[in-house]
Image (cartoon, grey):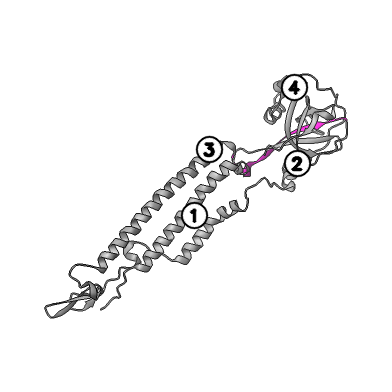
Amino acid sequence: MAHEHHHHGESLRDYFTEQLLTIFVVGLFGFVGIRMYLNGQLQYILAEQFHLPVLIGGIGVLVLVVIRGVSVWQEAGANREHSHDHEHGPGCDHEHGADCGHEHDGHSHEHGHEHLGHNGHSHEHDHGAEDHGHSHDLSWVFARMLVLFFPVALFFIGVPNSGFSQDRIDRLLGKEDQLADDVGYVQATGDWTAMSFNDLNDAAYDEGKRIALQGVVGRLEGKFKRIGEKQFTLYKMKMTCCAADIVPLKVRIVTPFALNGFNDGDWVQVTGVVQFRQTPNSIQFIPVIAVADTNDIKKVQAKE
């Protein structure tokens, strides 16, 4: 019973095609990780403490890609030598190709494509993809590579970026009522203290911290979100792990004058007197900075 004999050229081609595509796509992942670290894009999807591990991981991936690339190159070379030996085996006339016949006991025994079976039948062995443990369907390989390439394609078109929609920001900030306009405005003179959103928001829940910060002249930078003619929210997004857990940190800014020339999303610097006020119909305190002079609110360069 004859079985068709293949020299597995097609399966080897598919195997090496898959290997090269995988090396290429995985290498792109390493490249993208490094580039996102260098150009600052990681800040839009990951907290700062994870930026360095991404860089180290990207470098590690590129090192593995180089090692695997060298391995595949050597494997391809070994297969070329193996194929050459098959075509020019010992005892065959090179001019007559690989089908060299010899007579043994009245039976024709062919080296190359046919081998003598147990009952004198011509028996051929299939050394196809299964002999190498590889069964490759290139259409599936290309489909898989397209799926893997999708996040890389997003990077090349500029994603992720700082493009939080204003609607999402508004939902995160929530609806805020204006505070009563009975703040005792004090001119912020002399030295000021750099404030952080974390310190001011923590103090809102801690009486001791509120007492310590009450009346301090502080300076704070953040994004502008208008509430009324004389009040706005100064906010900054806080990311604990990734973009999915982002939350806004907010400080209320109140003034005795109309706010002109500022748009939602502008980065501004505020210098004023720190206070803590209760929101309407609530026992909860919120941090407030009272600004008495228009010169104490100014636009600054964006920080993210």
Residue 253 is a magenta residue: yes
Residue 237 is a magenta residue: no
Q: Secondary structure at mark 4?
A: loop
Q: Please give the residue where the numbered disc 2 appears in the rendered image.
A: 265
- Label 1: few (<14), some (14–19) or many (≥20) C-alpha neighbours in 10 Å: some
Q: Please give the residue where the numbered disc 4 appears in the rendered image.
A: 192
Report how far apart the C-alphas of labels 2 and 1 lie in the structure.
Answer: 37 Å
Looking at the image, do the residues carrying marks 3 and 4 touch, with CB atoms under 8 Å apart?
no
The answer to whether residue 78 is above or below residue 2 is: above
Report how far apart the C-alphas of labels 3 and 4 lie in the structure.
Answer: 34 Å
The residue type indicated by label 1 comes to Val
The residue type indicated by label 4 comes to Trp
Marked residue nearer the N-terminal end (1 or 4): 1
| Residue 264 in picture, x, y percent from top left | 78, 42
In the image shown, does 122 or 152 lie closer to the viewer?
152
Report how far apart the C-alphas of labels 2 and 3 lie in the structure.
Answer: 29 Å
Q: Is residue 9 left or right of residue 147?
A: left
Report how far apart the C-alphas of labels 4 and 2 lie in the structure.
Answer: 25 Å
- Label 2: few (<14), some (14–19) or many (≥20) C-alpha neighbours in 10 Å: some
Q: Nearer the viewer, mark 2 or mark 1?
A: 1
Marked residue nearer the N-terminal end (2 or 3): 3
| Residue 33 in picture, x, y percent from top left | 53, 45
- Which stretch is magenta? 241-256
Quarter of the rendering occupied by the N terminus: bottom left
Residue 135 in view of the camera: no
Extreme-left residue of the structure: 105
Q: Is residue 71 left or right of residue 266?
A: left
Q: Please give the residue where the numbered disc 3 appears in the rendered image.
A: 52
The numbered disc on residue 25 is 1
Marked residue nearer the N-terminal end (4 or 2): 4
